[in-house]
Image (tube, grey):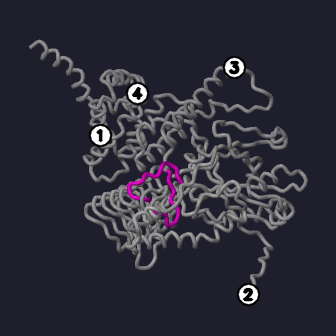
Amino acid sequence: MPLLPLKIHGDFVLISGDTLSNMSLMRALQEHKERKKKDSNAVMTMVIQRSKPSPITQQSRLGTDGLFVAIDPTTKQLLHYEENTNHLKGTFSIDKMLLVDNTSITLHNDIQDCYIDICSPEVLSLFTDNFDYQHLRRHFLKGLLVDDIMGYKIFTHEIHSSYAARVDNYRGYDTISKDIIQRWTYPLVPDVLSLGNSATKLERRGMYRASEIGQSRSAQIGPLTVIGTGTTIASNTKITNSVVGKGCAIGSNVLIEGSYVWDNVIIEDGCELRHAIVCDGVTMKSGSVLKPGVVLSFKVVIGQNFVVPPYSKVSLLQQPTKQDSDEELEYADNNSDTLDSAATGTMDKLNGDSSLEFSEMQHHVSSELGYGGVGYIWSICEGSHEEEWRHSVAPIPAEKLAEITQVIEDDLELVSQDSNAPASSGELKPDSQINAEDDAVYFEKEVEATFLRAVNENVEVDHVILEVNSLRLSYNMQSADCAGAIFHSMMKLALDTTHSTHNELLRNVQNTVNTWQKLLKSYLPGKDEEIEVILKFEEICLESARELSPLFTQILHLLYDKDIITEEAIEDWESEKKDADEADRVFVKQAEIFLQWLREAPEEDDEEDDE
């Protein structure tokens, strides 16, 4: 029976099929309907949320290009929409007429497009009339914004507590997967969505384990990991920050870190996977290695001890050539099952026919994926190398971040040289005095988010330093600001780690300081910055983390023992508090015994030298 065409007569929701959201649409729909009653040209309402792009790469946490948008703060009408495709440029241009026609405009580079739209029927007719529109944002939306004839308008609906994000590249896939594991998408989380006898249970440190899994006692399952039902994990295997699907067989001495292993995958002994994606039915022969950024397509076989290079894409299908037509590519897609069967048949023949001569076997098992491998490594197209690391599930390499940071520093130096030049007509310059306080708050939040991601994903300290440096440049902060924000993040981590007594909390602080002292020391070049850390500690104890107050002296002593805070800085801090009010001397009094010990320690050393 042929399908009848769908006729839409009223408002409808247009959502990208790769979008994940737990938001309620009721409020956005109501706003759109009420707006439509007052203004018949209000044909679309876009759902957006705040998400500040990386100051280094100028891309969002989902791996997409940063957005520059202009919005009327009163009506929420969208006035300008532009993707920042030039990743090294943090500026954009707007039509001066927008400033003339609108009494006020807010400019944003911290908006994420959720790709959820409430549309009126006029949107469909606009697509029909403009048949050359191929992209909803790049063509349709921007076409509407510059169209002066029809006068149609687009408005925005900002969500705050709900979650909405689109998976349109590998980095977005990685980010959203981690958000699901960390329960930002509740109720769309593994333990709630699991059904039947294969129920998944949430355990400590964000570990999800399905029922009926086989795990060796010596196997280690780390935090933020999901293990699917029917999967077996052999001895001395370590899995961290990863997702392993259903029915997988993981051998002994395997390392899986930051990776996504789909269903029915076989990983033999001694394999290593770091920040990779492995699709259904893949087999990794013993000793094979996947470097960061690798993607293995369905039913690929990686040969014994073979190392797949970083960012490689591996498929059973050969890579299309530039000369391949659309018809040829469609034919290849339609015949993918045949190719899969051929590959499977080859492996069955190798396993079942002992009469094969060695030369014939050599022909079957030798491939560009090593001995026993089946599949093809697709080469990276010319000019696409940068996109590979930008959109990969692998962390951005430290050397690449350093390279971009250097470019940013060079650009800032050029800007500072021209800072006294008069502004050109129509140029907008922010009022730094008005925004200074807000910037400090946002900076601290950005540093905390960077630090927590480093903790959860085991990011190297040098990599974190590069990210914090970029934030410092972006917000025009000093080393003392960085040190204070990092110390605050460290103390918050210690507080959020499970504890029931002050002694357990102190142990959490000790563990955190031991692990991240190099990061903190990187922003303590002198005594003044060290004093700022002590002052920040006082502020934390009095305001955001009073549970730390009784431990102030012990933690200060710990920072001294670890050579993070020097004796001179502590003495100067005490001296600064000498004439302060009693309320400002609370922690000086609390630390009196420790301060007395510091004052007497040199005398004891001198007496020992005399003896």
Residue 420 shows which numbered tag?
A: 3
Query: Quadrant location of the N terminus?
Result: bottom right
**Mark 1 and mark 3: span between their CA atoms?**
49 Å
Residue at image position (38%, 35%) is 537
Tag 2, which secondary structure? loop
**Mark 4 and mark 3: span between their CA atoms?**
31 Å
Tag 3, which secondary structure? loop
**Mark 2 and mark 1: span between their CA atoms?**
75 Å
Closer to the camera: disc 2 or disc 1?
2
Q: What is the span of residues highlighted in magenta in the rendered image?
A: 293-312
Look at label 2 and name its amino acid: Met
Location of mark 4 (residue): 524
Residue at image position (68%, 57%) is 157
**Mark 2 and mark 4: span between their CA atoms?**
74 Å
Answer whether labels 2 and 4 touch (C-beta < 8 Å). no
Query: Quadrant location of the C terminus?
Result: top left
Q: State which tag comes first along the sequence, 2 or 4.
A: 2
Where does the image place residue 323, in percent across and percent down from the top left?
A: 71, 56
Closer to the camera: disc 4 or disc 1?
4
Where does the image place residue 168, in percent across and percent down from the top left?
A: 61, 57
Is 236 on the left or on the right of 73, as rendered? left
The picture quadrant where one finds residue 411 is top right
Residue 335, relative to residue 500: is it above or below? below
Location of mark 1 (residue): 551
Closer to the camera: disc 2 or disc 3?
2
Look at label 1 and name its amino acid: Leu
Q: State which tag comes first along the sequence, 4 or 3.
A: 3
The picture quadrant where one finds residue 58 is top right
Look at label 3 and name its amino acid: Asn
Answer whether labels 4 and 1 touch (C-beta < 8 Å). no
Secondary structure mostly taken by the magenta-highlighted segment of the chain: loop
Location of mark 2 (residue): 1
